[in-house]
Image: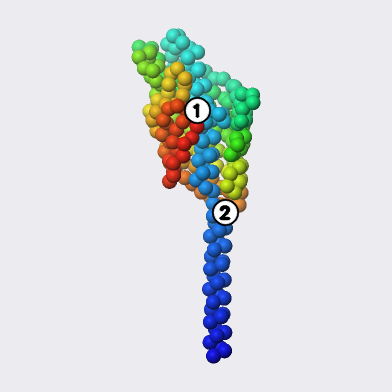
Amino acid sequence: MKTTTYLRALTTMILAMVILVSSCKKAEEIIEAVSEEEAAEAVENSISSESGGLAQQIEESTAIINSYNESKNDYCGMSFDSAINIANPSETVITYYYNLEWEWVVNCNQSQIPKSVVFSYEMDGGYDAPRMSASDYASQSLELSGLDLSSNYWTYNGSYEREGTCQSKIGEQRTFSSKITFEAIDVQVDKETGRLVSGTASVSINAKTSNGKTFSFDGVITFTGGDTATLKFENEFVIQL
């Protein structure tokens, strides 16, 4: 009888230990994993003009086009370059500073009428936002077509890649390296404001935490106008442009 009681007690103890170890392992995995919310935050800051992201570079490219005014056809086939620094306005919640190297060329048809402007740039710097900060590098290749006066919109096609080290200020406040890639096809850009107003783009983020945990998310960004967009991973997030 004593032996049976002892075996039951031993079995119970072993099961309890297995459950405890399993629970600890699951908790550890949860702690190590980067959340969708953190991934969405990294994507938002890589795009938002408030943190010196892609949307601001689109605005910058439209300003370059507008600077040619009616004389674009005088620049057919010519290439240009420029180095600029951008920083946040004073007294803003989000701070950023980036160095950019721009190149662009005006494409024309056989009648020497401008059809599009192709831009490429590289930038490096960093930002500090309430929910995340980063030191990163980005490169972009984009084309703005629809230069004729009959349209109120440019059509944006482009690829964008951004990578660096992020420090999350939400959740477990993890540090992780990230690589964000973005691909847009026929997205509409308002000629007056230079803002992205409609269309979709694919986005993916691959990253590694400081303890070696890797993660990836693939999603779609839908531009909804009004300086906002929706980011769809498994869940949906509203992001500010």
Using residue 240 as the reference point, say whether residue 200 is left or right of it: left
- Mark 2: few/some/many CA within 10 Å (<14, 14-19, 20+): few
Instruction: Tell me the element at label 1.
Output: helix
Q: Mark 2 falls on what kind of element?
A: helix
Question: Residue 84's image quarter?
Answer: top right
Q: Residue at x 59, y 39 (%)?
A: 132
Mark 2 — residue?
Answer: 31
Query: x, y (%) of residue 7?
Result: 54, 83
Please state which amino acid type lies under the numbered disc 2. Ile
**Residue lying at 54% horizontally and 77% vertically, measured from the top left:** 12
Q: Residue at x 53, y 68 (%)?
A: 19
Residue hosting label 1: 55
Q: Image quadrant for the N terminus?
A: bottom right
- Whether residue 134 appears in this view of the structure is no
Placement of 111 over or under 37, stated as above or below? above
Front residue of 146/28: it is 28
Q: Earlier in the sequence, mark 2 or mark 1?
A: 2
Image spot of residue 8 (x, y percent): 53, 82
Report the amino acid beneath label 1.
Ala
The answer to which quarter of the image holds residue 169 is top right
